[in-house]
Image (cartoon, helix red, strand yellow):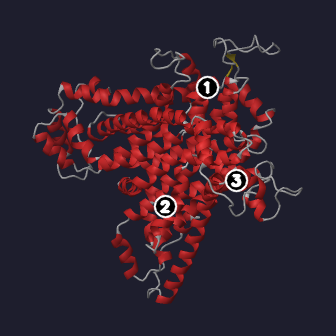
Amino acid sequence: MSSETLSRPRTESPRVGGPGAKPKLRGQIASQAFLIIASVLWILPILFALYVALRPYSDTSKYGYVSLPHHLTLQNFKDAWTQSDMLHFFWNSVLITVPAVVIVLALAAGVAFVLVRVNVKINVALLIIFTAGNLLPQQVIITPLYRIYLKITLPHFLSDSGLMYNSIFGLIVINVSFQLGFCVFVLSNYMKSIPGEMYEAALVDGASLWTRFWRLTVPLCRPALAALATLLTTWIYNDFFWAITLMSSGDKRPVTSALANLQGQFVSNQNLIAAAAMIAAVPTLVVYLCLQRQFIAGLSLGSSKG
Amino acid sequence: MSATSQGRTPAAVSDKPEDSTSPVRRRRRRLRTMTTRDRIVVALLLGIPLLLDLAFVWFPAIGTVLLSFTKWNGVGSLHEKTCQPNMPSILNNGCWYGVQNYHQAATIYPEFWPAVRHNVIWLAVFVVIATPLGMLFAVLLDRGLRGTRIYQSLLFLPVMLSLALIGIIWEFIYSQNYGLINTVIGRNGNSNAIDWLGNPHLNLWAVLVEATWRQAGYVMILYLAGLKAVDPTLREAALMDGANPWQTFWRVIFPVMKPINIVIMVVTVIESLRAFDLVYITNKGINGLELLSVLVTSNIVGETQRVGFGSALGVVLLVISLVPISIFLYQTFRREDTP
């Protein structure tokens, strides 16, 4: 669609005379209407699930799910929380997400700095290796990865199974490795926008490479790092695939992949499933509500320098 | 790593070559600034992540290609002997199988072609509906109408949710007996109730609505970020020249957004190849919801492990994904090679 419009020859001169006030107003009303309808449609599934979660099972089984509420209760949330041991799964998520985000940002910042500011002859090739690695579908690498995880032994304090497979450590490693490419790409683009004069000045002051990285580059990249941290926290928390393929036992899984089990556990009570799903959504929603402005500012900063 | 191995590596700042200082002088000045300690720092900063990336992403990627030519159930070791035809499979394990896995996938594996078709449909829906819809949202939001922030937050909300969660949430919409749609159209709980997620002719489309619901918001936020970064004077200039909003967008804004357009193209294709979570949470990817990604997974984590066969399916996914990846890399890094 877009390419067709683009390839049209651009010889004809634009129409003279701006659009009048009337069509402009009509356009605004149409845009408003479209956005209102879209927003309602977009929020509807979430609100409906929330509505189901708020109603007692007796109410919905009697009147159906699409009906006016006779009772509203938080009991489903309470039951879902206690009956499924959700705290435990949340803790698993924290144990995986927090280290993974910190490590991947630290590593990616270092790589991006070297690739942008130091000539190692194969800068572009290395950047391509990192970037392309992140673009592969996970399923392309899962088969050998699964075998590798079954082969690598870990000391007991890292994995009680003694293997990379079925360990929190293993999930951190794959999340870090897989997300590295994306972060290196974004951060290297961002670092290219830092004026070279700043590095010249730092050199004149006798700053070592490490100082130029840690004291100069990293602080300047704070907006990009914050945006990436937001994205990565959401992505790693939301990860489903690595956790269900590289972990066999349900009790070690993070909350997102544990939802699949909960669905089976509460199969007779949809209201509890809805409540559990809503609880699992809370962390990402908190991130979004608190960091939305920063998130979008960071993205626009990064994309303008691409 | 590579920096230390080359003694004369100049530590040139990779500034744009248009800079006034001549590159030769620049390089000479840098040469003095790389101390041994600096080289060690470079080696560590680059080496550790590179090792991780190679060991856990690229080594498995190559491994998939190699394993796809073997027949292996994961037990015992791999060897170089060719598989013997007409031998029980227990004796024919870990052997070289040639292109037999690919041949079997294309000829006798019943799920293969449906999965390919479903992946193609998935991609088509993303290209034709989800991505343009997201772009439209972005363009409308960029006009700064009243309530823009609220619309944006609502439309972006699904992107924050995991796909597994989205699958669960939408079951309340689609459920045959109590779902929102069937209740509203009066077909719940009776014989002509529509089984949106169970009917193999319908369920792919039902799941694609869920996927579009999320993908459009994702594209929207990427595109909106790009639109915000467009120099506002461009728009003013177009307005002065008498261009209407439609012309301004397609002739002025869209062309300068080429980098973000490419990013969105790649995201669209890759996301449709990666599609997995939604169908897996819905019905484990069977009965009308087969996708290549599901077939790969079910051949390695299922009861019967067919490592070679699963790898062959993974290679199919790899080959397809290399097309958008190559385009993206070419467009992105071409400038850096030939300034």
| Dot 3: element | helix
What SS does tag 1 mark?
A: loop
Q: Is residue A17 left or right of residue A31?
A: left
Q: Chain of mark 1?
A: A
**Mark count:** 3
Q: Give the amino acid at mark 2.
A: Ser
Q: Which residue is mark 3?
A: B172
* Labels 2 and 3: the sequence-earlier one: 2
Closer to the camera in the image, A114 or B147: B147
The answer for which chain carries disc 3 is B
Q: Is residue A111 left or right of residue B65?
A: left
* Circle 2/circle 3 CB separation < 8 Å: no
Report crowding for label 3: few under 14, some 14 to 19, many 20 or more residues within 10 A (C-alpha): many
Tell me what residue is drawn at x 14 percent, y 38 percent.
B29
The Cα atoms of the two marked residues, 2 and 3, are separated by: 23 Å
Q: Which residue is mark 1?
A: A249
Q: Is residue A133 above or below residue B99?
A: below
| Cα distance between the residues tagged 3 and 1 | 28 Å
* Disc 3 with disc 1 on a shared chain: no
Position in image of residue A295 (x %, y %): 40, 53
Q: CA distance from mark 2 to mark 1?
A: 36 Å
Q: Position of residue A201 (x, y in %)?
A: 13, 45
Q: Which residue is mark 2?
A: B153
Give yes or no for contact between labels 2 and 1 (Cβ–Cβ under 8 Å).
no
Closest to the observer: B299 or A154?
A: A154
Q: Compared to B247, does A158 lie above or below?
A: above
